[in-house]
Amino acid sequence: MPWIQNYDPFGSWPVSTFVAALPVLVLLGSLASGKLDAWRAALAGLITAAIAAIGPFHMPWDMAVAAATHGIVFALFRIVWLIVAAVFLYDIAVETGQFEIMKASIAQLSGDRRIQAVLVAFSFGAFIEGAAGFGAPVAISAAFLVGLGFQPFQAALLCLIANTAPVAWGAIGTPIRTLAEITSLDVEAISATSGRILPIMSLILPFWLIKSMASWRDTFAVWPALLVVGGSFAGAQFFWSNYMSFELVDIISAVVSLLAGVALMKFWKPKTEWRFDHDAVLADQVIDPVKPPITLTGKSVARAWMPFVLLSISVLIWGIPAIKKQLDAHTSWKWEVNGLHLQIARGQALTGHETPLDSDREKAVADIVPITSTGTAVFIAAVVSACLLGVGPIRQAQMLARTTIRLIPAIGTIICMLALGFVTKASGMDVVLGLAFTRANAMVYPILGAMLGWLGVALTGSDTSSNVLFGNLQKITATKLGLNPILMTSANTTGGVMGKMIDAQSIVVAAAATGEGGKEGELLKAALLHSIALALLVGLIVWTYAHVLPQMVATPAH
């Protein structure tokens, strides 16, 4: 017999909800207070989660240990390896001097920091999100902005805010595909409905992004660029999700947006080139009267951008389902976690079944993926780039060792974060928090449903995981309240993306990629209001579609 999750162990849902929230409160409270550094805060949250799971929620202790172990394995292969590889590639570009040429080429296109921010954080970041997902967009884009001369903290915050609207179709459409599998709803209908919610946010986001770093006046001074970049992205996002397929929505939208932005720069420039106050100081520091200024040629620019071109190609190839399937079949190992796999059953409040079915049992399969991990694709791009740039094997090994040592605190934090997330998920505490949102009527639930998705991503660090956790709950609740299940499951994934900027995993990745380790709490506080406000905007759109414009919800094709 499986162990059945109990979502109200105290017989009082407010008390049970509060206890379920304790691990998150301890983690985020410790980060926000600044009294503990990130890895200690994560460890405190993990210990709290284990105590709550084994104690009030009566989870067997060996299952809690197995769940934490599962999280650690996932963290090592899916997240840690990716971050190390991404920062390693960035270090190669810096140490070989290619980043100086990249900066010069960007400055030639536009020296305006507003334009640079929206093209790199929003458009380029969306491309990486579509190809790789997970922590890659924040890590790579944030490191890119730092290389361009952005302050590290600001670069991290900008990329956290930007990595939202594309997330629902990240990693070749993984969140949308997973949501359809979990709910047994039509994948194209979910994608199309999401593609009628998020394009509105994609149009707003470039303006929001620049407003976070400049005044309203300076933001609207570049409205043509923001409108072209955001509008082209939103248009492609709507068209591809509604009339083509769901897998390549992000990649197509990002490419269209980048090309539109570059084309605009050929015949339009801001009246005043907006720079940071510290740019003048940096310019004074790097002036060398002996060293001549950088002369850009087509060959030098192509050589400088080559590591990131290889990166884009490799992660795109790795993300193609057919190739990924072949690599998985021959180079990965699946480990059914002992004492956990199919030994936990979801409760009636989540499934609608009084007696658990076989389909209600939770799978716990750890993927050992040394080759098919996105981190491997990034690492191959880094090694090939280093070889083409004349960096020998010994020097590469030394650089990789320095990169890894520098990231040790972040690695410890990520491991604890993922272990915490897997323990709360296995014990059912995540579901307890989600069920609190469902105690509402049909009038307000569309907004709360979007916020439920937001909570899921904030807790798990993944829109895919949030869809697994709450997708079926959204379907059940929508049916009970007389709402459209397609709309409310879409609300889960579209509201969820706005929680991406505050999940602990993204915060740690952004801090590690920009060298801002120790400032995770400050990043969280800086991103929190942006996250809540954008999630509420998604909720307002969903509410409008539910009660005013129901025709905006896509109809399944079969």
Image: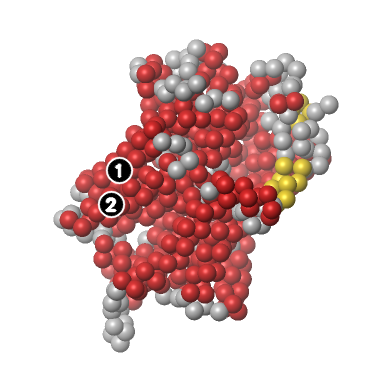
- Is 60 left, or right, of 214 in this rendering? right
> Which structural element holds mark 2?
helix
- Let me know if residue 256 appears in the view: yes
Residue located at (39% from left, 60% from top): 145
Residues at circles 1 and 2 in contact by the CB criterion of under 8 Å: yes
Comes first in the chain, label 1 or label 2: 1
Q: Assign the N terminus to one quadrant of the image.
A: top right
How many residues crowd around disc 2 within 10 Å: few (fewer than 14), some, or many (20 or more)?
many
- Tag 1 residue: 232
Residue located at (59% from left, 59% from top): 376
Q: Measured from the top left, where is residue 233 in percent x and y?
A: 34, 43
Q: CA distance from mark 1 to mark 2?
A: 9 Å
| Image-quadrant location for residue 241 | top left
- Tag 2 residue: 261
> Which structural element holds mark 1?
helix
- Let me know if residue 18 appears in the view: no
Amino acid type at image mark 1: Ser
How many residues crowd around disc 1 within 10 Å: few (fewer than 14), some, or many (20 or more)?
many
Measured along the vertical axis of the image, is residue 555 above or below residue 526?
above
